[in-house]
Image: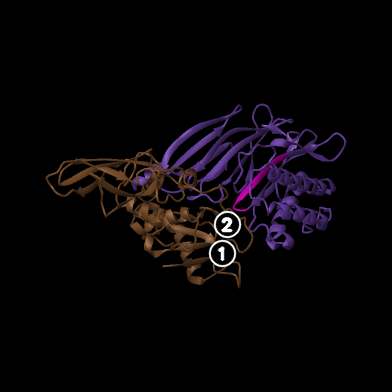
Chain colours: A purple, B brown
Amino acid sequence: MRTHSCKQTVYASLVPVMLVSAAARLQLPSEQPFRQQLASVYDRLATMKEWNSAEDLSLKLQVKELTNSYILGAINQATPSSAGSLEHDLNESFSQAIGHMSMEDLRKYWGDVHYASVLVAPWGEQDALVVGYMIPHGNTSLDVIEVAVHASGGGYQFVAEGGREMENHALQLTLMPRGSSQAIRFLAYGQRLSANQSPVGVVLYQFDGKSLAATWSRSDLRQGAVNTQGNKIILTYQDASHFEKGTPPYFLREEYELTSHGVKLASKRWVDSK
Amino acid sequence: MSTGDTGKITVTVTPPGVAETLSFAGTSSPTSNPNSSGAVTLTISGSGSGTITSSVTASPTGNSGVYKVTASAGGATSTNSTTIYIPPQILIQMMYAEANGQNDSCREALGLAFRNRMGNSTYWPGVTTYQGAIPGQASYNTSITTGVQNYLNDSVAVWSSSLADYTGGSGCFWSPTYAQWQTVQSALSSGTTTFPANVGDPGCYKTVSGYGPQIVYLSSVGTSTRGGTYAGAPAFLFERKRATTGSVPAAVVQLN
């Protein structure tokens, strides 16, 4: 669990989150300075040989700060008619930016980036925003998961961020029902990049107003799939030992139930396919 | 041989009636040991007269090396040498876990995919050994502690680089279901440059600049022996980075 102030542990990011003019209700900050600044940092990142060195992390932190600043700029200028429209507009902006690849000056650094999203969850008198995006670097990615709430001084601010549980994963987010504490719960899940047999990871995060904690997780589910159904999390994945033996069924299906206080395995059985 | 095996070296001492104790040079330092976390030390001992069969063991477990050993006896040194190949055991274990029941080409191709990652700091930073490359990236069966054939021979061919890369530089692989294979096959037939969706690929090279990944189909790896949803599909498909020059390359190619 980390809070926004713990910058030394933040794995900064990079950002495919360009909010473009396609979002009619959003008045966006200018893209050009942001892109130029981002490209400048990436020029330096591209020369890094030690990917986890202090300088490398420092540069990634710069990328993340640039990105967060841009995101907050967009959010705080938005005047959506409802929480739903904000979520729709932000996510549409992401897909638009990715869809027509307007970031030509950044294309030399990264390729196909699909994973960035915003979830809007009621939180007090305002909404909380769960923001997730991945920062590709080489054949890996840095995944950023943060929560922004409306600050007392006005405007949204990021107040908590997740750990590195989803690093190197194609990040996707989905809200889950709240527990007894009314904390916001959401799943982050996705395929681990560049790993043979396409393993999937999933993490349940909980935001209590101050911090964002990973409360449950599964990792490296071969050829895995994650589905949700109400308060259920359904995982289907290939069992490597059966695959080795060559005797179907090869897949396991696990169904978990979110309770007021956590996650409980409800059933586990063999299935023929995902 | 494997670090779990006991090999044999036969030495003929002449004249045949003279009892000798053999010694062997070249047991402590490998002539090469590519992409491994450590070298083994060979232990070879034998004595007798005439034709002497000596036992060969290698330790520690999991290490590797190519050794050229030469026998001596009674102050005379053999004019012949024996080359001993001991691949990283984890390579054998990976081939067994991922491709048990498949053919040699299939197992070799999996090994080649890992070999292609070595020293490629752009896409696989820090990956320089099989012991470091395989965990977390593929299954490996740790109960396989000996040189099971043909997994041993396949491993030696890959590790020693006696086998040329026929995967086209692929660094990743996966086992498609038949439904996923149908989608890939359709893209292959059409020559489309659009990467097919929902095919279960590992997502390699997706976040790098250029045209992104390309699926590589190798007919030599054969069809899956798994049955069930895998029946009729290739045992494995591979993934590499598309060329970045010229027009956009096809999303799927067949290399053999």
Name the chain letter of the residue that bears numbered label 2: B
Which residue is tagged 2? Answer: B205
Whether residue A160 is visible here, answered yes or no, is no
Name the chain letter of the residue that bears numbered label 1: B
Which residue is tagged 1? Answer: B242
Query: Which amino acid type is marked by label 2?
Result: Tyr
Q: Which mark is residue B190?
A: none
Marks 2 and 1, how far apart in space? 9 Å
Counting from the top left corner in percent of width and height, residue B254 is at 45, 67
Q: Is residue B10 left or right of residue A191?
A: left
Callout 1 crowding tier (Cα within 10 Å): few <14, some 14–19, many ≥20: some
The quadrant in which residue B182 appears is: bottom left
Counting from the top left corner in percent of width and height, residue A264 is at 53, 30
Counting from the top left corner in percent of width and height, residue B123 is at 58, 54
Majority secondary structure in the magenta region:
strand
Part of the protein shown in magenta? A138-146
